[in-house]
């Protein structure tokens, strides 16, 4: 019996004063899955991802990630778990003063990977995301679409067990969106379990992957 | 083992990057530390030299008890015994009229001719007393002088009282002033450093947040900041002391001859003192960064 990578049981999230962002959600993601999470703006997609990566605590219910109960995580455990979850944030969370390379490399540096390994991996990823010529550019000087790809590269850098991508193609054209999806599939083949929040039809339509839909905080199986 | 080396390399890299990316702030911090050390070192140097001068002065305190007439051998011995009893281990020399005259003649050198008119009798016999114990206060000096005056045959006692009193008061005042300014300086510099480091951390809030999101360990985030404090302390104090050394040299070459004329050679801080200043500054900077780190990172 393999343990689910993500197990969410009867979870609700209430933001003060009384905004019900998630309402009694239950969801299991197995190892090796790619799951697409769709829903209109404000449906609670980002909130769900934040619960999984431990940036937010559930108001009710239980969130388990890689066997850890997120409500009872010590500081050190939380830190180690974060190394196993690559997150491409909706608002990127990049460091604008650092270069593209440095931003992506940072994720690997905190896990003390050797510099040669870091260089090879970062260059490969940037190549794949058509950012090779921007490698030494400051992130501040990049377009939104370029920044988005840097965020995706950073999430993928460690080839972590879990990748969470929040609106990863929000600023990309169709070709680039496909490129990003291809990258996710490669990462998935390499062993990552991936949860993608999106309302991009090019990702959702004709997708062979499991699709879930959030509607005002409630989960509908699509 | 490999992992530790890699961790050290990562921390070194992080520190270098931090220093490079906030060059302006770093220079301000470095300058602050340097200036604080320089000014503190300057005060320390003055106070050290003053203390030495004061000590020399104590040693040079000399009482001269003049007699109205030459004392016979037995009386001299008795006088010396009584003084030794009151002030053990004193250095006492009886200077008879002839010796006094010869000394004065020697001191006058080429102009000794003025003495020709005055007979060898004209200078009084005296006892020169270098007290065996340190007489620190003016009261002690006066008490000892009063005692000397009670001795039989003593007409007067001289010990440059007015000058001594003034010098002692002055040196006491200067000591207090230097101590206070030194203390003030340590306080202000500590606060400045802590505040500046807090500012650098505040500037780097965003970066620390991202590192947290990426799962960086507490050590990974804190050690570079501490290394920065260490660097500020070491480099700042070294620079400050280097400038102080330069100033000292400059003063010596330009005013050294005058200093020698005062029979006083200005000394520099001993290597142990220099090391102490560097160590203390580094510790202060490290402490400042630790306090700031603790305060700023607890929030996130
Ligand atoms: N920190 C917060 N405080 C209060 N309300 C919040 C907070 N974060 C999110 N919300 C609210 O919770 C609801 C769900 O927000 P969430 O960001 O999860 O939506 P989303 O599905 O990601 O939307 P989008 O597609 O626009 O990114 C929204 O009504 C939002 O206003
Ligand atoms: Mg969102």
Image (cartoon, coloured by chain):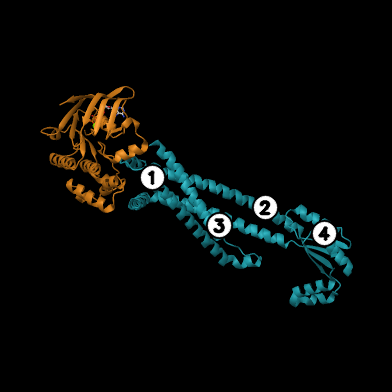
SS for dot 1: helix
Q: Quadrant of residue B140?
A: bottom right
Q: Chain letter for mark 4, please.
A: B
Question: Comparing marks 3 and 1, which lies closer to the viewer?
Answer: 1
Task: Identify residue for label 2.
Answer: B172
Are labels 4 and 1 assigned to the same chain? yes
Would you say residue B38 is visible in this rendering? Answer: no
Q: What residue did someone put label 4 on?
A: B85
Residue under disc 4 on the same chain as residue under disc 3: yes
Q: Residue at x 58, y 57 (%)?
A: B45
Q: Which structural element holds mark 4?
A: helix
Q: Nearer the viewer, mark 2 or mark 3?
A: 3
Q: Give how far across and how far down residue A51 sits, in percent.
A: 28, 31
Where is residue B132? Give x, y as percent.
76, 60
Which quarter of the rendered picture does the C terminus of chain A lie within? top left
Residue depicted at x 87% and y 62%: B155
Q: Secondary structure at mark 3?
A: helix
- The residue carrying mark 3 is B273
Q: Is residue B151 left or right of residue B201?
A: right
Q: Position of residue B288 (x, y in %)?
A: 47, 45
Which numbered disc, 2 or 3, marks the residue that appears first in the sequence? 2
* Marks 2/1: CA–CA distance: 49 Å
Report which quarter residue B128 is drawn in: bottom right
Assess whether mark 4 and mark 2 are in contact (beta carbons under 8 angstroms): no
Quadrant where the N terminus of chain A sits is top left
């Amino acid at each position: 019996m393999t343990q689910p990578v993500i197990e969410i049981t009867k979870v609700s999230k209430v933001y003060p004063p009384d905004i019900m962002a998630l309402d009694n959600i239950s969801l299991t993601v197995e190892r090796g899955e790619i799951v697409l999470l769709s829903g209109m703006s404000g449906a609670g997609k980002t909130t769900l991802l934040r619960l999984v990566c431990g940036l937010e605590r559930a108001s009710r219910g239980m969130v388990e990630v890689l066997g850890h109960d997120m409500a009872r995580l010590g500081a050190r455990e939380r830190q180690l778990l974060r190394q196993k979850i690559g997150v491409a944030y909706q608002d990127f969370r990049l460091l604008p003063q650092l270069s593209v390379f440095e931003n992506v490399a940072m994720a690997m540096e905190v896990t003390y990977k050797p510099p040669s390994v870091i260089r090879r991996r970062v260059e490969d990823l940037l190549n794949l995301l058509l950012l090779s010529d921007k490698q030494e550019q400051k992130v501040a000087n990049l377009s939104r679409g370029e920044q988005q790809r840097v965020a995706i590269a950073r999430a993928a850098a460690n080839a972590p067990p879990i990748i969470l991508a929040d609106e990863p193609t929000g600023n990309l054209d169709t070709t680039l969106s496909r490129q990003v999806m291809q990258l996710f599939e490669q990462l998935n083949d390499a062993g990552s379990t991936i949860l993608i929040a999106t309302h991009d039809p090019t990702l959702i339509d004709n997708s062979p992957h499991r699709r879930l839909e959030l509607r005002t905080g409630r989960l509908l199986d699509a | 083992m490999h992992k530790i080396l890699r961790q050290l390399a990562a921390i070194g890299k992080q520190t270098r990057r931090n220093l490079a990316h906030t060059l302006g702030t770093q220079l301000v911090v470095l300058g602050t530390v340097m200036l604080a050390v320089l000014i503190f070192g300057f005060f320390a140097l003055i106070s050290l030299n003053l203390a030495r001068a004061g000590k020399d002065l104590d040693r040079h305190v000399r009482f001269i008890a003049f007699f109205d007439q030459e004392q016979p051998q037995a009386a001299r011995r008795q006088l010396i015994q009584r003084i030794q009893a009151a002030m053990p281990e004193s250095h006492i020399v009886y200077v008879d009229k002839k010796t006094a005259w010869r000394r004065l003649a020697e001191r006058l050198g080429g102009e000794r001719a003025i003495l020709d008119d005055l007979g060898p009798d004209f200078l009084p016999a005296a006892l020169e007393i270098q007290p065996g114990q340190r007489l620190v206060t003016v009261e002690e000096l006066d008490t000892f002088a009063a005692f000397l005056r009670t001795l039989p045959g003593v007409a007067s006692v001289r010990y440059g009282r007015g000058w001594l009193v003034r010098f002692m008061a002055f040196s006491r005042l200067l000591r207090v002033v230097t101590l206070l300014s030194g203390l003030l300086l340590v306080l202000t510099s500590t606060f400045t450093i802590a505040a500046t480091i807090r500012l650098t951390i505040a500037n780097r809030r965003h970066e620390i947040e991202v590192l947290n999101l990426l799962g960086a360990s507490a050590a990974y985030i804190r050690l570079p900041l501490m290394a920065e404090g260490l660097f500020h302390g070491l480099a700042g104090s070294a620079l400050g002391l280097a400038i102080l050394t330069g100033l000292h040299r400059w003063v010596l070459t330009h005013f050294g001859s005058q200093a020698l004329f005062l029979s006083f050679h200005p000394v520099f801080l001993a290597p142990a003192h220099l090391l102490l200043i560097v160590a203390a500054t580094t510790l202060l900077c490290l402490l400042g960064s630790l306090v700031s780190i603790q305060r700023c990172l607890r929030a996130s």
